[in-house]
């Protein structure tokens, strides 16, 4: 079974631009969560999507948004990029939206904002 | 407030030494889940173990073992006979109902195993 895939793996943008990141979960998994990892703040939860609906949201500004498609693939969008948005963005999938199942992470997208 | 505390920022050991990574958590939920993940230099988080709040049994998997103690709100991770390949950052995480079961991570412990 293929793991979680994320594209692109690396991205360089400039302040003010917007960016879209993509995540394909493990086949059969319907829940996709996004996390941001920075040296200062560590790993922080952005949001979770399940069956095309946002089920949970972390404490991030509205510039961060996401969506999920009928095939469970998810995209995350960041508008009006700031230098502080430079981070590793990790996507995780699990088979249900419940707590019982562990989340499997993708390799991440490393975003650099100049 | 930090809900998961990993007090050890960096640990360095020589190969074959045993090493314990500490994790202390804080929650008011009676049902919660605790996790350990490993993050090698490649960046991907690798799932190691999940424990629910009702299961305090210690677990051993090869050279890895976990000690879950609700009385002290701790979920410590021990690597026996460490190897160079164990070098990575290790994260402890808490998942609880009042946060929609999102993973709340500690700051991580960077483990360096030298030959």
Image (spheres, helix red, strand yellow):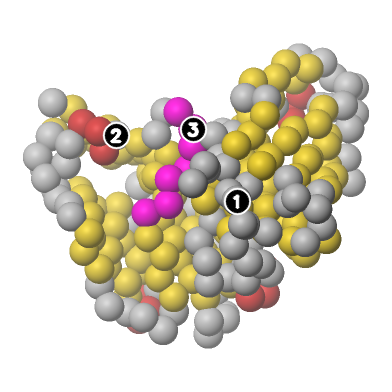
Instruction: Kindly identify the residue that appears in the image at 42 percent across and 28 percent down.
Output: B41
Q: Residue A100's x, y, as percent?
A: 53, 72
How far separated are the C-alphas under marks 1 and 3? 22 Å
Please name the residue that numbered disc 2 is placed on: B87
What is the span of residues highlighted in magenta in the rendered image? B42-48
Snapshot quadrant of residue B84? top left
How far separated are the C-alphas under marks 3 and 2? 13 Å
Q: Residues within 10 Å of mark 3 (few under 14, many from 20)?
A: some
Point out which mark residue A27 bears: 1
Point out which mark residue B43 bears: 3
Residue A43 visible in image: no
Instruction: Kindly identify the residue that appears in the image at 11 percent across and 45 percent down.
Output: B81
* Residue B47 shown in magenta: yes
Q: Residues within 10 Å of mark 1 (few under 14, many from 20)?
A: some
Mark 3 vs 2, N-terminal side:
3
Instruction: Kindly identify the residue that appears in the image at 44 percent across and 75 percent down.
Output: B52
Q: Nearer the viewer, mark 2 or mark 1?
A: 1
Looking at the image, residue A63 sits to the left or right of residue A7; the answer is: right
Residue A73 visible in image: yes
Q: Secondary structure at mark 1?
A: loop
Above/below status of B23 relative to B38: below
Please report, as a chain letter, where disc 3 is located.
Answer: B
Above/below status of A110 relative to A65: above
């Amino acid at each position: 079974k293929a793991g979680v895939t994320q594209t692109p793996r690396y991205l360089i943008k400039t302040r003010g631009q917007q960016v879209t990141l993509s995540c394909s979960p493990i086949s059969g998994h319907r829940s996709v969560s996004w996390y941001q990892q920075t040296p200062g703040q560590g790993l922080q939860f952005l949001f979770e999507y399940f069956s095309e609906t946002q089920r949970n949201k972390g404490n991030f500004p509205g510039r961060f948004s996401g969506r999920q498609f009928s095939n469970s693939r998810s995209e995350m969008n960041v508008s009006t990029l700031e230098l502080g948005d430079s981070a590793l963005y990790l996507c995780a999938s699990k088979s249900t939206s419940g707590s019982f199942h562990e989340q499997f992470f993708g390799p991440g997208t490393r975003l650099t904002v100049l | 407030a930090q809900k998961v505390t990993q007090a050890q920022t960096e640990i360095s050991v020589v190969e074959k030494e045993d090493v314990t990574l500490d994790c202390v958590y804080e929650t008011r939920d009676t049902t919660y889940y605790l996790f350990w993940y490993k993050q090698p230099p490649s960046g991907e988080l690798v799932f190691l173990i999940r424990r629910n709040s009702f299961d305090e049994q210690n677990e051993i998997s090869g050279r890895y073992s976990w000690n879950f103690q609700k009385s002290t709100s701790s979920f410590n991770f021990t690597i026996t006979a460490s190897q160079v390949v164990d070098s990575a950052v290790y994260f402890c995480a808490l998942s609880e109902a009042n946060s929609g079961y999102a993973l709340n991570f500690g700051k991580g412990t960077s483990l360096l195993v030298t030959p």
